[in-house]
Amino acid sequence: MGLAYTSIRVKDMGKSVRFYTRGMGLKVVGKRSPIPGEEIVSLEDKSTKQRINLMWYSRGCRMYAPWKQDGVELDHLMFVVKDAKRQYKALVSAGAPVAMELHDFEREGTKISMGFVKDPNGIWVGLRSESKSRG
């Protein structure tokens, strides 16, 4: 058994696609509307092949539900990036709200930089990079 993908219900498909493609470097690998009022955009990480489906439903769609609260349905997504500080600053400069300030810590001889921003739907997106501590 293996995880095939994660789906995120989005408020604005355009903003969400831009965030995950331009901001996070994912690639659009598919678009479909299997039922009336549903839009699905499939994204893939080039290196890990992990997938995220962005899901949007119109009011008339049988899958539609009113938006409750930003980001509470999904705890967070974590991306391992080459330079978390650089990626974090770039996303915040582009308008992504800060969810948790970037911070550094050390674990078992590895220096870790990690911070969280919010995507256009309020979902926390983690950025993490690691390097061996110089000792």
Image: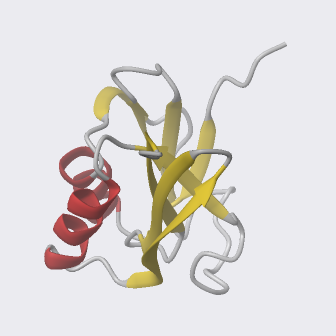
- Looking at the image, how many numbered discs can be counted on the residues? 0
Quadrant of image for the N terminus: top right
Residue that appears at 36% across and 43% down: 81
Check the image and name the residue furthest to the right: 1
Q: Nearer the viewer, residue 102 or 75?
A: 102
Q: Nearer the viewer, residue 116 or 31?
A: 116
Whether residue 47 is situated above or below residue 63 in the rendered picture: above
Whether residue 44 is situated above or below residue 57 in the rendered picture: above
Q: What is the x, y in percent for residue 8?
A: 57, 54
Whether residue 67 is situated above or below residue 109 in the rendered picture: below
Residue that appears at 68% across and 56% down: 63
Residue 83, can we see it? yes
Residue that appears at 66% across and 23% down: 4
84 vs 110, left or right, is left
Q: What is the x, y in percent for residue 112?
A: 50, 55
Check the image and name the residue furthest to the front: 135
Q: Nearer the viewer, residue 65 or 54?
A: 54
Residue 58, can we see it? no
Q: What is the x, y in percent for residue 55?
A: 52, 50
Check the image and name the residue furthest to the top: 1
Snapshot quadrant of residue 87? bottom left
134 vs 86, left or right, is right
Coloring applied to the structure: secondary structure
Residue that appears at 61% across and 80% down: 67
